[in-house]
Image (cartoon, rainbow, N blue to C red):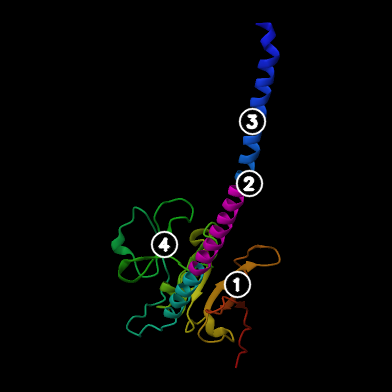
Amino acid sequence: MNMDLPTLLEKVNTNIDFVDNIIKSREKELKKILKFKDSLKQEKKDILEKINDIERELKLRQEIEKEKKNLIVPSSEEKEDSSPATIHYENDDNSCFKFGDIVDTIGNRHYGFTFVGKNGSFQNTTRTNSIDSEDGITVPINISKYLTDTVSKYSNLKYDESSILAYELPYHDVTVQKYNVKENHMYEYVCWDYKKEYYNVKKWYLEQINIETGERTRPGKRRNR
């Protein structure tokens, strides 16, 4: 029996060599397969990037078209008065809601704040580049375009009450007309301090936004005549 051990060992070594050769041949095949897989992954990445580019372009065009619609001036019959707004809370009777009033729908800071729009609908900004909702709220264009003096409507409310940090304004608004603005732009009345990087509700200014490019510029105020 012991005399067969060398023979068995040689047989085992031969089999090991055989397996090693199979592994080596398979490694070459596997490298080719992995290389092919990498090329497929790159092709997939390129396709996804093209899809994302198309979706971004489509979303941008939709945003631009939406902004252009907001430039349409409502008729005098559609206009609303700029009387002071009121803040209502979730259990308040909605029969007392007036256009432009703020409604707190959830009772947690300003997170549930919304504006009473036409026909009792609730309105919030839908613009992509509006201020972060974590910081505060924006008076949306779907409210301000029906007013002539949007800022005055909310001037009776302190920031701690309203959390208003920005106004989307139409060209005909009184505040916009205090500046040398270009027509056919979106106008945002804001209080962001770029140097100190925080909102300063004591210092407001107007930015005009090019609807096509999104470029923001700060127009100067008109001189008193």
Question: Crowding at label 3, few (<14), some or many (≥20) Cα neighbours within 10 Å?
Answer: few
Which residue position is annotated with label 2? 31
What residue do we see at 46% from left, 50% from top? 108
Location of mark 4 (residue): 114
Q: Earlier in the sequence, mark 2 or mark 1?
A: 2
Residue for badge 1: 204
Question: Is residue 54 inside the magenta stretch?
Answer: yes
Instruction: Give the percent coordinates (x, y) of residue 211.
Output: 52, 79
**Front label number (2 vs 1):** 2
Q: Which tag is nearer the camera, tag 2 or tag 3?
A: 3
Q: Quadrant of the C terminus?
A: bottom right
Labelled pair 2, 4 in contact (Cβ < 8 Å): no
- Give the residues in magenta: 32-55
**Residue 182 relative to residue 145: left or right:** right
Which residue type carries mark 2? Answer: Lys
2 or 4: mark nearer the eye: 2
Q: Spatial distance from mark 3 to mark 4, Cα to Cα?
A: 75 Å
